[in-house]
């Protein structure tokens, strides 16, 4: 323990010295061009390897979500029951032993030969003989769509509600907070089921069902930030100088709240995707033959031990998707937080 | 302080009443009856039974009736589990959920804090990335997939733990891990960013300038302040987790309340829906209240009469 | 501190590697293990371990409605008769066959000397009490209608008569006399149904609201007693030494664990913690070769309801025939279900009811509405011409469980492919909501199922009489109504003619009218410890009997 302490002491001294020198130099010469908030954030984001990996992954997955389903001749709903439950096979990779794309099932049995199938299904097929490659990327598309839609709607409702609540405070805030408490108290599942019953089951009603309870989180965060910021000196100063409420909100508070809001939005996307998956798990998910990553994972889950490809492929995609959004969000949080400015 | 507490208590009661009312009427919007054998009964036979339970009365009458019983502390009888009192059912089922949830929250919080701490101390180092990745990976895998794999590998393939049941500590290990993943990720994340914020604040600079050892700074100044927001986070998180996870309970055969609740909604078991909702709301509201109080106690900067954070 | 976090880090890494290992396509060695059929301790203690997907909703025989309750009641209690091999009624509390009066309406039963688990004798009054209780509208028993064959039963249940006026009386402690409304031929088998179980009046009144809620607030007179009941967790049955036929019972104990996930079931079997499990269709391919694998045909028939009140198209008999013949049923049974279920070209299931000639109903009846794409297309074109339209969109209402969803998707694809101009929209709803829509007849097509209540074709066929409570699709055919009415009344004492009438009715329903489109008769796949023998599977009431089960 004592050596550890010593170690830390040494580091600490380093820390203390370096920035001091830099600041001294910079204040003299201004060698860097002055950067606005977003440029600076981008610079810091670029420096964060995790965030960049996340960003690249998101771009890649989005690309596949857009173009993946049309990369082969199958459609997401076309069934061929004679070709059901085939393992993945990619002819170009079929000879590489350790890759799972040789068309053999988990016991090393070549199902394509056994069923006399000439075509190769890159990701295999499901129980109805539908091409999983197409379905997986189609599902990715739907999942991203649901995530984005939910996040955007949350974003607007949350900012408006949280902003008003936080900015005006007092009685308004108090009432609005109680409303939120009530909303959080009503079981979401009842609301979700009602939504799905009242409206035609589909992407939109599922998204709305999630939003109707989901915006609360955003509103709470915005409110918290507003409360914290509005007591700070720079706001007080502006207020003293006679700034209007509008000006205070848009010029002073909003830019400072933007960081946490964007981060929260980024976290909303994966949680919406997961909520949809949970709804699939209890049988209230997307309407077949449409697919989402959640419904695919749920379908495949039962086959975990028998046809692992049906579970693993959508699981890996959904995990990568969630992972990348989370990494990017984490990176953004660091980058957008003015206090992290070096 | 006393005035604040009293005011909040009144609010809490009102909030609960509104939740109960809204849930009651929303629930009655669900089509279908709570009968178990609905499929086989003719409408006339259904009427006989619905009459007996008073389910053919006008809604306001049913509502007044329910609320009157509620004030007497009577939550009614379940439809699906013939005539079993709802309060007994909740009592029986909350135990395992709460136990498991508690264990998961404790385990998850400890691991989460450590991961967050490691990541913050060495920001942007390999350790930081590793810790963050572990935390994020944990929530990137759908929970039922994660739980299913845990069970398959650690109970069937390598029988270290039992597959499923509720008989003793060893039966709780796998579900606890599965449940705590979410806690770990959330706590680790908050811990990291809070610590980073605290570490860059003026008073830490001052402490450093004074030559206090970095260990002392960490433990005495940084950690303590960074933990405050974690407490607000933990309250609702604990409620969420302790009221049961349908997925985990299903897979590990745990007689908890999560499954019960989902089932009651699916089967229109009105009294159970109401009972569990009320229970959940009370728990939630009380926890938020306690957290608010605690917050004021721990963080002297916050005055209770003013806004919370 | 560092050390601890390192350890935890390791744990997490382990968890991660689990995921990665799964990605490696793993699990080759699971197959060898599967062959052993559980770890199978020697089982000489005759303790049977089971799983069930839900807790027992009720141990009060008057209130029970579901298979878990009925199966447990069947193990722990006994009525006049119980279901034996091939679903034949064998002696229970009744000592020998009943005496039946000339007109078939008065049945007299002699009771044997048997005891409740508290030592009191089982008397005729216990039956009278239990049956009156089940029919009393205040009990709100959801299976009360199963007793409507008893004289005045319906009137009592509807509150028009007092329970005392029910046609059942205790002549003395050991003699029970029952008056029937109609001399139904299947009454003896019907008596095995759970609602007909006796209840000890004194004990039930003593327990009041608590009767049937806990293991120790219920009385037993069957082969086993409920020893332990941890709600939503597990329940334990122990052999009942007081049972009159205790020598036959070999199992000492039956433990049932509540498990909701089918995968967990299989894992429990693999680890030797369960001896008999239901297999979901995904696992059939994995265990088909296992010596403990078998399938059991059930009485449930699944079919498409075609509502004639909500669509001009479905009013047209050609359109209905086209839909009924226009999809490949074999795809459902062989690929989707994969558990021994059979294609249904009929409404009354196979191996279900035997006629007076001792032959299965299906041997007397024909096959109708077989998959025939050519015929289907012909009928479809005829329907188009008759309606003067080329395209139509129909909505298919469906359950929201995984299997039904698959079947729905399959039917949609098949029908759209085979019948030109047809579009099917799937609408899946939670069970209760689906039932509600059906009751209100607010649907066009619907995937439905029907299981038998008693061992007679009537349990299926009387569904579709005009205005019947479960018709729910606006089907009406005068001749059909007449045949069914006769089968329930005038022909009861002429079994051969009645049988013919029922065969004819089914033919009208399917071949002439195509009122419904039958899909399949369900089977279930099971995996059992090979040492386990003698578990009986039933087509009505309780799912299984354990009285004769043992480990060899």
Image: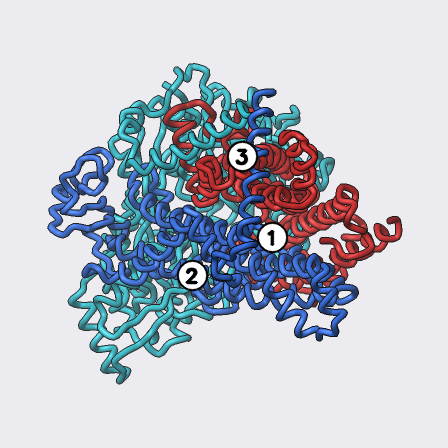
Chain colours: A blue, B red, C cyan
Q: Residues within 10 Å of mark 3 (few under 14, many from 20)?
A: many
Disc 1 designates what residue? B269
Secondary structure of the residue carrying numbered label 3: helix
Tell me which chain the residue with mark 3 is part of: B
Disc 2 designates what residue? C428
Secondary structure of the residue carrying numbered label 2: strand
Residue B94 place in picture, x, y as percent:
64, 39
Is A76 placed left or right of C457 in the picture?
A: left
User: Extreme bottom residue here?
Assistant: C388
Badges 3 and 2: C-beta atoms under 8 Å apart?
Answer: no
Residue A176 place in picture, x, y as percent:
71, 64
Q: Nearer the viewer, residue C549 or B3?
A: B3
User: Extreme front residue here?
Assistant: A28
Asked if C218 appears above or below C515 in the picture, the reply is above
Q: CA distance from mark 2 to mark 1?
A: 20 Å
Q: CA distance from mark 3 to mark 2?
A: 49 Å
Q: CA distance from mark 1 to mark 3?
A: 48 Å
Is B43 placed left or right of A65 in the picture?
A: right
Disc 3 designates what residue? B118
- Do dots 1 and 3 share one subunit? yes
Q: Nearer the viewer, mark 1 or mark 3?
A: 3
Q: Nearer the viewer, residue B175 or C68?
A: B175
Tell me which chain the residue with mark 1 is part of: B
Q: Quadrant of residue C376?
A: bottom left
């Amino acid at each position: 323990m004592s050596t550890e302490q010593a170690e830390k002491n040494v580091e600490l001294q380093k820390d203390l010295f370096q920035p001091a020198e830099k600041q001294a130099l910079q204040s003299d010469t201004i060698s860097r061009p002055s950067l606005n908030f977003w440029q600076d954030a981008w610079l810091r984001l670029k420096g964060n390897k995790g965030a960049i990996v996340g960003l690249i992954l998101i771009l890649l997955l989005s690309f596949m979500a857009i173009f993946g389903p049309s990369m082969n001749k199958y459609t997401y709903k076309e069934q061929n029951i004679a070709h059901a439950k085939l393992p993945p096979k990619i002819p170009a990779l079929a000879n590489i032993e350790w890759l799972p794309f040789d068309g053999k099932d988990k016991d090393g049995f070549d199902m394509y030969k056994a069923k006399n199938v000439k075509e190769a299904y890159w990701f295999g097929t499901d129980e109805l003989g539908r091409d999983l490659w197409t379905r997986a990327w189609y599902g990715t598309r739907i999942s991203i769509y649901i995530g984005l839609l939910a996040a955007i709607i949350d974003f607007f409702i949350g900012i408006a509600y949280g902003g008003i609540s936080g900015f005006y405070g007092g009685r308004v805030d108090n009432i609005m907070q109680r409303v939120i408490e009530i909303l959080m108290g009503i079981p979401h599942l009842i609301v979700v089921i009602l939504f799905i019953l009242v409206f035609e089951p589909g992407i939109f009603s599922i998204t709305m069902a999630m939003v109707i309870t989901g915006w609360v989180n955003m509103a709470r965060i915005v409110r918290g930030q507003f409360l914290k910021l509005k007591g700070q000196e720079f706001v007080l100063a502006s207020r003293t100088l006679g700034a209007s409420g509008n000006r205070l909100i848009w010029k002073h508070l909003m830019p400072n709240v933007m960081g946490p809001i964007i981060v929260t939005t980024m976290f909303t996307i994966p949680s919406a995707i997961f909520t949809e998956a949970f709804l699939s798990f209890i049988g209230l998910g997307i309407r077949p033959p449409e697919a989402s990553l959640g419904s695919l994972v749920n379908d495949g889950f039962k086959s975990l031990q028998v046809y692992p490809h049906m579970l693993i492929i959508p699981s890996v995609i959904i995990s990568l998707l969630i992972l990348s959004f989370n990494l990017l969000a984490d990176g953004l949080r660091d980058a957008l937080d003015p206090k992290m400015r070096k | 302080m006393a005035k604040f507490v009293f005011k909040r208590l009144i609010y809490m009661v009102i909030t609960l009443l509104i939740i109960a009312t809204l849930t009651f009427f929303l629930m009655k919007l669900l089509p279908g009856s709570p009968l178990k054998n609905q499929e086989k009964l003719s409408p006339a036979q259904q009427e006989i039974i619905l009459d007996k339970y008073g389910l053919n009365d006008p809604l306001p009458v049913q509502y007044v009736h329910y609320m009157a019983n509620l004030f007497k502390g009577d939550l009614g009888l379940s439809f699906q589990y013939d005539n079993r009192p709802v309060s007994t059912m909740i009592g029986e089922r909350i135990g395992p959920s709460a136990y498991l949830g508690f264990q998961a929250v404790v385990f998850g919080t400890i691991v989460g804090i450590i991961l967050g701490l490691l990541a913050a101390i060495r920001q942007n180092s390999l350790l930081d990335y590793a810790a963050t990745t572990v935390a994020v990976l944990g929530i990137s895998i759908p929970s039922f997939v994660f739980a299913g794999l845990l069970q398959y590998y650690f109970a069937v393939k390598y029988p270290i733990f039992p597959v499923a049941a509720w008989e003793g500590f060893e039966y709780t290990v796998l579900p606890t891990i599965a449940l705590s993943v979410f806690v770990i990720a959330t706590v680790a994340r908050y811990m990291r960013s809070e610590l980073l914020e605290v570490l860059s604040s003026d008073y830490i600079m001052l402490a450093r300038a004074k030559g206090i050892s970095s260990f002392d700074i960490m433990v005495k100044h940084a950690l303590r302040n960074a933990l405050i927001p974690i407490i607000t986070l933990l309250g609702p998180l604990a409620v969420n987790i302790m009221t049961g996870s349908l997925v985990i309970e299903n897979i590990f055969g745990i007689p908890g309340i999560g499954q019960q609740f989902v089932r009651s909604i699916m089967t229109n078991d009105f009294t159970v829906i109401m009972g569990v909702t009320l229970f959940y709301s009370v728990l939630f509201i009380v926890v938020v209240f306690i957290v608010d109080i605690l917050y004021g106690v721990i963080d002297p900067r916050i005055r209770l009469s003013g806004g919370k954070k | 501190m560092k050390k601890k976090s390192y350890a935890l880090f390791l744990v997490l890494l382990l968890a991660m590697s689990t995921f990665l290992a799964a990605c490696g396509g793993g699990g080759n060695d699971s197959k060898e293990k599967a062959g052993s059929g559980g770890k199978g301790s020697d089982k000489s203690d005759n303790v049977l371990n089971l799983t069930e997907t839900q807790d027992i909703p009720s141990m009060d025989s008057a209130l029970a409605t579901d298979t878990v309750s009925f199966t447990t009641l069947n193990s722990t209690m006994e009525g006049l008769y119980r279901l034996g091999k091939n679903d034949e009624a064998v002696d229970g509390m009744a000592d020998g066959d009943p005496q039946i009066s000339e007109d078939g309406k008065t049945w007299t039963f002699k009771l044997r000397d048997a005891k409740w688990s508290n030592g009191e004798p089982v008397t005729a009054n216990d039956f009278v009490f239990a049956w009156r209780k089940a029919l009393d509208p205040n009990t709100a028993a959801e299976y009360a209608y199963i007793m409507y064959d008893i004289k005045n039963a319906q009137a009592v249940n509807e509150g028009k008569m007092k329970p005392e006026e029910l046609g059942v009386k205790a002549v003395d402690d050991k003699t029970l006399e029952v008056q029937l409304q109609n001399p139904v031929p299947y009454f003896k088998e019907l008596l095995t149904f759970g609602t007909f179980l006796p209840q000890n009046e004194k004990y039930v009144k003593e327990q009041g609201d608590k009767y049937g809620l806990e293991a120790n607030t219920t009385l037993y007179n069957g082969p086993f007693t409920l020893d332990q009941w941890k709600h939503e967790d597990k329940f334990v049955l122990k052999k009942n030494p007081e049972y009159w036929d205790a020598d036959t019972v070999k199992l000492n104990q039956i433990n049932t664990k509540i498990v909701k996930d089918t995968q967990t079931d299989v894992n429990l079997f693999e680890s030797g913690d369960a001896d008999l499990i239901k297999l979901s269709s995904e696992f059939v391919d994995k265990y088909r070769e296992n010596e403990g694998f078998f399938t059991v045909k059930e009485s449930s028939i699944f079919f498409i309801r075609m509502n004639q009140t909500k669509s001009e198209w479905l009013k047209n008999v050609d359109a209905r025939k086209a839909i009924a013949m226009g999809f490949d049923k074999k795809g459902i049974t062989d690929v989707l279900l994969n558990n021994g279920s059979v294609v249904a070209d009929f409404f009354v299931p196979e191996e279900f009811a035997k006629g007076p000639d001792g032959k299965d109903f299906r041997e007397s009846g024909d096959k109708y509405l077989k998959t025939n794409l050519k015929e289907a297309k012909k009928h479809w074109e005829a329907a188009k011409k008759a309606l003067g339209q080329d395209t139509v969109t129909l909505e298919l209402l469906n359950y929201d469980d995984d299997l039904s969803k698959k079947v729905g998707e399959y039917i949609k694809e098949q029908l759209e492919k085979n019948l030109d101009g047809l579009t099917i929209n799937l609408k899946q709803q939670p069970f209760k909501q689906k039932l509600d829509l059906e009751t209100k007849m607010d649907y066009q097509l619907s995937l439905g199922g029907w299981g038998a209540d008693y061992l007679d074709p009537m349990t299926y066929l009387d569904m579709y009489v005009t205005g019947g409570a479960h018709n729910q699709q606006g089907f009406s055919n005068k001749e059909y109504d007449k045949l069914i009415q006769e089968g329930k009344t005038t022909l009861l004492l002429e079994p051969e003619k009645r049988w013919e009438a029922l065969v004819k009715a089914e033919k009208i329903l399917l071949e002439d009218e195509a009122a419904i489109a039958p899909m399949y008769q369900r089977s279930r796949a099971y995996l059992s410890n090979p040492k386990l023998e003698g578990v009986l599977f039933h087509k009505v009431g309780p799912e299984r009997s354990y009285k004769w089960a043992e480990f060899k």
